[in-house]
Image (cartoon, rainbow, N blue to C red):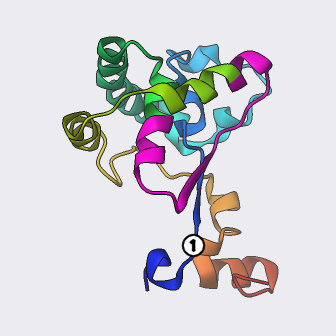
Amino acid sequence: MEMRKLGSKGLTVSALGRGFLTGQLKRFEDLAEDDYRRHSPRFQGENFQRNQTLVEPIERLARQKQCTPAQLALAWVLSRGQDVVPIPGTRRCAYLDDNLGALNVKRTAQDLADIEAIAPPGVASGDRYPASMQALTQSQGPARKEATGRPPHG
């Protein structure tokens, strides 16, 4: 059953692709030694390179729109409807200012179609979490119960 049919709202976790869509992350080596993303399958080896190739056309489109890739990504999330809420991680005031700039990004139907063509659902390479963490997510119901002894929503 769809969220909208239930009148529920959705939160988009990692609306900036765990940093990929900020335009600041170019190489695995850019991650600090203690950065948790070094353990994420999406940031490992060929997955990192494949995912980075998805960012490059987003960066080009952002330049055309005179905004940052992060602003464009958040503007796309905001275009999904009032029942979808992005929750980007914001560690610095400068990031907050940049994120708020998404509210001013003018987006056309063509812009949205271009973004969806560049990055359709499921296109990211690599699992979202390392296997040890994936087993604890709600999306892995039986695996979570097996790992924790609790059902997915417990």
Q: Is residue 22 left or right of residue 115?
A: right
Picture quadrant of residue 115: top left
Residue at position x 22%, y 35% in the image: 114
Position above or below: 50 against 124: above
Picture quadrant of residue 141: bottom right
Position above or below: 139 against 90: below
Residue at position x 61%, y 15% in the image: 29
Q: Which residues are magenta?
A: 74-96
Give the residue at mark 1: 139
Give percent across and percent down for residue 131.
62, 59
Give percent across and percent down for residue 60.
30, 16
- Would residue 45 be visible to someone looking at this image? yes
Q: Is residue 29 left or right of residue 96?
A: left
Position above or below: 122 against 119: below
Give percent across and percent down for residue 62.
37, 19
Give percent across and percent down for residue 78.
48, 46
Q: Is residue 154 left or right of residue 95?
A: right
Foreground: 151 or 91?
A: 91
Picture quadrant of residue 108: top left
Q: Amino acid at mark 1?
A: Ser
Q: Within 10 Å of the Cα at label 1, are there few (<14), some (14-19), or many (20+) other Cα atoms?
A: few
Position above or below: 154 against 99: below
The question of residue 93 being in magenta is answered with yes
Residue at position x 52%, y 34% in the image: 44
- Would residue 21 be visible to someone looking at this image? no
Residue at position x 50%, y 15% in the image: 26
The question of residue 81 being in magenta is answered with yes
